[in-house]
Amino acid sequence: MPFLPVVDTKLNVWTLAAVLTALYTLSGVVRGWWNASLGKRRRLIRAYRRIAPFVRHDYVREQFGEPAWQHKRTVRTYRSGVEVGESESALDEVELTVRTWPLGLLGYLVTWCNEHDEVLMYSLTARSRLFRPRVSIGPHRITLGKTPLSRGGHVRRVV
């Protein structure tokens, strides 16, 4: 007569609790990894596509949080409706607020705002090969860090 081991088929409450705790911990680890890597990229690209010139700075702050750096910069702009021959008298001094958001290891976002806190210009600098958002400029679609425009031809590094 062969020996058959006794198998307990009753549901063990402690085993079930251990499995549920392990699954909860594993889901937290996966969620944390997603929010720190692929999900962060997706969230930043989606937020970047939502901003445009002349939006309020408060809207950009909603999308990206508080800026890390902020300073005032005086720039010279051309006055509208000026004749072609007038050059120096056609310039006005305007004070802009420059704000910078570091986007982790992925890049930087910089906005230039006027005195009414409207975004006049913004730029996105990609620092990682993993962060290559597509930007539409008129009929052209540019992928930062990948489009031939970003290579700049024969660029020399100055040491």
Image (tube, rainbow, N blue to C red):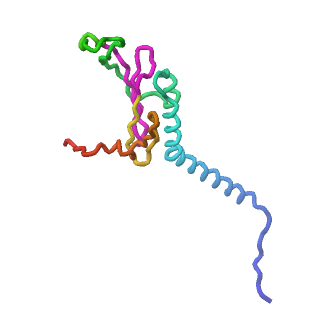
Q: Main secondary structure of the magenta part?
A: strand
Does residue 113 belong to the magenta stretch? yes
Asked whether residue 156 is drawn in magenta, I would say no
Horizontal and vertical percent position of residue 114: 40, 17
Q: Is residue 137 or residue 93 the one in the foreground?
A: 137
Seen as rendered, the residue at the extreme bottom is 1
Q: Residue furthest top?
A: 89
Tell me how many marks there are: 0
Along the line of sight, which residue is nearer the eye, 125 or 140? Answer: 140
Q: Residue furthest left?
A: 159
Image point 41% across, 14% down: which residue? 115
- Is 144 left, or right, of 64 in this rendering? left
Whole-percent x, y for residue 36 in the image: 50, 44
**Position of 136 relative to 17 (above/below):** above
Residue 140, image quadrant: top left
Whether residue 15 sits left or right of residue 62 in the image: it is right
- On screen, 19 above or below 90? below
Residue drawn at (36%, 13%), measured in percent from left and top?
Answer: 80
Judge left or right: residue 13 versus residue 40: right
What span is in magenta?
Answer: 93-121
Q: Residue at x 51, y 47 (%)?
A: 38
Figure quadrant of the N terminus: bottom right
